[in-house]
Amino acid sequence: DMEFYRNNGERIHYEIIGRGFPVVFLHGNNLESGYFKKQRVLSKYYKLVFVDSLGHGKSGDVLGKISFSYLADSLDELLSYLNIEKCLLVGHSDGANLAIKYAALHKERVAGILANSGNITFKGLKFLPRYACYFEEVLYKTLGIIFPFFKRRAKVSPLLREDLNIPKEVFSKSNYPVIVLVGDHDMIKREHSKAIADLFPKGKFIERKNQGHNIPKKDSNYFNKTISKMVSYIQSCTK
């Protein structure tokens, strides 16, 4: 377990296991890198980098106003410090949104993206989850008045409503592989996930039957195989 301090003093907690091609894992809202427990077996083959986003897990609090571009810049500072020139970004939920925003801002470091159950606009969520996001934010704000634990959660829950506002043409010349992976019982609208895949020339939409919003945990074999296939593809292209 390692700590990295940004130039502005913010503290990012991360962990590196294994060696080989770098795969960077980005977790969802109000979760932490421990979410990817079932992906740790991949350290036999690759260098895995697990990051707790600012304001989450063992990382310190956000000093500025939180947004995906803010988190993307903090991630870039970390990857630069770690001398990671190219990596596969694996993001779940808000982590998928972060991976896409990162690619829009720092494309030179991106070798591929596995975007699992992300939504680049709030409207991309189905009705009930959208309602739940508002409820969660109000609940955390209210409880945060009394409990520091919820105060911290309230600070990052606005990310759930953030639209990424990425112009379509940003990715039009990208040549790295992108897989948008969702479950058929996901909280993301199907056409929204397809539209995300369509932003990328090498984007592919995959829907897993009988799966919901937690494929990395519930369908980990498939998820891990997808990561391996993506790394093999990336390595075959760079030879």
Image (spheres, grey):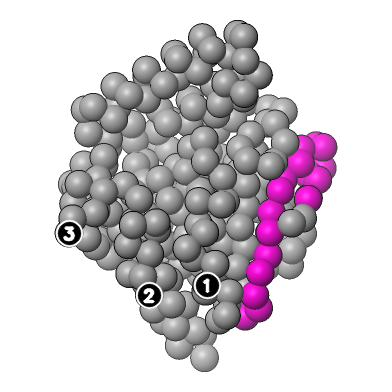
Dot 1 or dot 3, earlier in sequence: 1
Kindly indicate whether the residue at mark 2 contacts the one at mark 3 (C-beta within 8 angstroms). no
Nearest the camera: 36 or 157? 36
Label 2 crowd (10 A; few <14 / some 14-19 / many >=20): few
- Provide the secondary structure element on which disc 2 rests: helix
- Amino acid type of the residue tagged 2 in the rendering: Lys
Residue identified by numbered label 1:
41
Q: Which residues are magenta?
A: 3-22
Find the distance from the CA under tag 1 to the CA under tag 2: 11 Å
In percent of width and height, residue 198 lies at 26, 57
Magenta run includes residue 190:
no
Nearest the camera: 54 or 196? 54
In percent of width and height, residue 31 lies at 52, 41
- Amino acid type of the residue tagged 3 in the rendering: Lys
Magenta run includes residue 8:
yes
In percent of width and height, residue 220 lies at 38, 64
